[in-house]
Image (cartoon, rainbow, N blue to C red):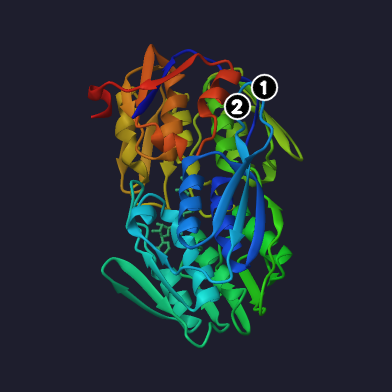
Amino acid sequence: MDQISVNGGARLAGEVRVAGAKNSALKLMAAALLAPGRTVITNVPRITDIAIMAQVLDRLGCTVDFVDEPGPDGTPSPVREVVIDVPETLGTEADYDLVRRLRASIAVLGPLLARCGYVRVAHPGGDAIGSRGLDMHVAGLARMGADITGEHGFVIASAAGGLRGATIWLDFPSVGATENLLMAAVLAKGVTEIDNAAREPEIVDICAMLTAMGARIEGAGTSTLRIEGVAELRPVVHATIGDRIVAGTWAYGAAMTRGDVTVTGIDPAYLEIALDKLRTAGCEVTTSQDHFRVRMDERPRSVDVVTLPYPGFATDLLPMAIGLAAVSEGASLVTENIFDGRFMFVNEMARLGAEIKTDGHHAVVRGRERLSGAPVRATDIRAGAGLVIAGLCAEGVTEVGHVHHIDRGYPNFVADLRALGVEVHRSAAPPDVIG
Ligand code: EPU
C-alpha cells in the first residue's frame, strides 16, 4: 500500500481542472444497462471505483472499453471515455467480491430488475463512514410490485409481470434509493412519483442521460420526481458533470493554506453553500459559469458547518470543513447529519495536533495557528484527501498511509497537488505505517 508525504507550510496556488463526478459516472454506467446497444460516457474520472464498476458490468455480460481523452502534458489523462456495449440478454447477479469493494454497485439493482424482471445483488453492508442501509431501496421497489427477499447475503428481487408505477415517499432524500427507484421506474408500466427525492446535481445528470435515452421524467433537481414509464430506451453519448467534491477539496485547500486556486470544469452553483462558508471565513471567492477562484490572504476565521442533503453542505466535504476549522481563528461547531461514522477519521486529524472534541453527531474544533506533521492513515476517500491537505498546514512532514482510498475518488491527486505548487511524494509505505 502506498503513502503520500507532504511538507508543511505549502501554499496551494494555480489552476486545476476537475474531471467528471465519480458519483455521477458510476450511476451513468449502471443506467447504460437500461438500453441494449452501445452507450458512450465521456469525462469519466480515471479512478479505481470506475474500474470496479466496469468489472461489475462486464460480469453482467457487457463489454466495457476505456478510451483516453487528451490529458495535460506529460500526465496520464485524468478523464476517459467509457464505451459500454450492452447485450440484449443480461446476467442478473452481482457478487460480493465486487460489491464489497464498491457499494455503488447496488445501483445495478433498479436497472436489472427493470430490464430482466429478476436480480440477485450481494448486500453491500456498511463501510468506514457508517452503516448505510438499503431499506428505502427495497421498500420503494416493493411498492412498484417487486418481491424482495434477503438470503445468504444477497438481495433478491423479482417482478415477473414487470414493475408498475407507484407513489413512493422516501423517509429521507437518499441519493442511492432515489437513483435505483428512478432507474427502475423509467421502464415500469405507468407513472411513478418519488416524493422527498434527492436533489443532488448527480441525480439531475442521470435524469438528463435517461431523458436523452427516451425516458419521460419531470422534476429533476426538485424533491418530486414524476416518471412515466416507456417500453424501451436507446443508448446515447453523454458527458458527465464535473466533480463538486473534488472541486470543493481544492477550494478548502486554498483557504487552509492561504493560497489562490482557480478550479475549472465545474459549475460553481453546485457548491454554493460550501463557497459561501469560505467567504465567511475570509476568502475572496469569484465565480463564473464553469469555474471559480478562491483566494485567501489571512488566517481563516472559524465557521460553523452543518451537513445536509443537497443543496445543504455536502457530507463528503466534512473532512475539509474540519481541516479548515482546525487551522482557523476561534472555535467551530461542525454537525454531521448523513453518516453515523463520518467522524471516525478525527482521531487521525488529532494526530496532526487538531483539537477536536466529538459528541454524537457534533464536533467542536478549536483552531490552531499550525498543525504538527505526523504519520496518519486515510480511513475513506474524503478523509484521505482531507488529511493530505491538513498536512500542508502542519509543521514538518505528514505521511498519509492507505492512500488507495484517495485513488477511489481523486484522479491525478498527486499531479494536481504538484501543479498547485506542492512538493509531494508518493511511495510504498513501510510496514509500521500501513499496519
Ligand atoms: N440510508 C438508509 N436506508 C436507505 C438508504 C440510505 O438508512 O435505504 C441512509 C444511509 O445509511 C445514510 C443516509 O441514508 O446514513 C444517506 O445515504 P444515501 O443513500 O443518500 O447515500 P449513498 O447513496 O449511499 C451517496 C454517495 C456518497 C455521499 C452520499 C450523500 C455514491 C456512490 N455515494 O451515497 O459519496 O456521501 O450519497 O451525499 O454516490 C463518496 O463519494 O465518498 C461518498 C461516500
Viewer-nearest residue: 255 or 249:
249
Q: Identify which amino acid the numbered label 1 is placed on.
A: Asp
Q: Quadrant of the N terminus?
A: top left
Assess mark 1: CB under 8 A from ligand 1?
no
Q: Which residue is mark 1?
A: 73
**In front of the other: 276 or 102:** 102
Q: Residue at x 70, y 66 (%)?
A: 213
Residue 289, quarter of picture: top right
Q: Is residue 394 above or below residue 39?
A: above
Q: Residues within 10 Å of mark 1 (few under 14, many from 20)?
A: few
Can residue 89 be seen in the rendering of this structure? Answer: yes
> Mark 2 Cα within 10 Å, few/some/many (few <14, many 20+)?
some
Q: Secondary structure at mark 2?
A: loop
Residue at point 60%, 27% (across, down): 282
Give ligand 1's quarter of the image: bottom left
Labelled disc at residue 282: 2
Residue 258 seen in the figure: no
